[in-house]
Image: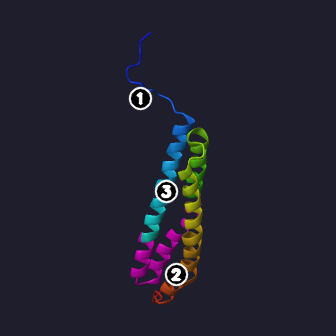
Amino acid sequence: MRENRMPYLEVGMTLYSLALFVHILGALALFGAMGLEWVALLNLRRVEMAEQAREWLKVFALFPRLYPLAWLAIILAGLCMTAAVWKGAGWIIVALVSGVVLGAAGGAPAWRRVRRRAVPQCVRRLPLPHR
């Protein structure tokens, strides 16, 4: 039998590496959504016609679905990795509590405020398109 001199080139995926991939994918989706939301808000402030505002408002329809999916991927994959390897390290509890506090303090109230105040005010100040 030939000895494998490069074990890091082994083909195969463990549950931990799959969970790590999903965890990183969730983090990328979360930060991608944050960046997209930031761009949409900036462009929504710059629009001059109601039709332009409607186009950017369509982007906001993605966020109520995208944020929970990204968080779910992060949390479930993180819990899977915790069960497999980390087994209750202190920083895991701090990360979970921080995620809940940040989501409760910033995510939901800010989203409600944008939908209730900022978006209608932006659309109200725009001239209606002539047809």
Label ID, residue 8: 1
Which one is nearer the viewer's eye here, 7 or 115?
A: 7
Type of residue at label 3? Ala
Query: If you read the primary sequence from the N terminus, does the residue marked by circle 2 or circle 1 appear first?
Result: 1
Q: Main secondary structure of the magenta part?
A: helix
> What is the x, y in percent for residue 103?
57, 66
Type of residue at label 1? Tyr
Q: How is the image coloured?
A: rainbow
Judge the density around disc 2: few (<14), some (14-19), many (≥20) Cα neighbours within 10 Å. some
The residues colored magenta run 39-68
Mark 2 to mark 1 CA distance (whole Å) = 51 Å
Label ID, residue 70: none
Res 40 quadrant in image: bottom left
> What is the x, y in percent for residue 120?
54, 84
Tag 2 residue: 119
Label ID, residue 29: 3
Residue 2 located left or right of residue 92: left
Query: If you read the primary sequence from the N terminus, does the residue marked by circle 3 or circle 1 appear first?
Result: 1
Outermost residue on the top side: it is: 1
Mark 3 to mark 1 CA distance (whole Å) = 28 Å
Looking at the image, which residue is at 56% across and 74% down? Answer: 111
Which one is nearer the viewer's eye here, 112 or 96?
A: 96
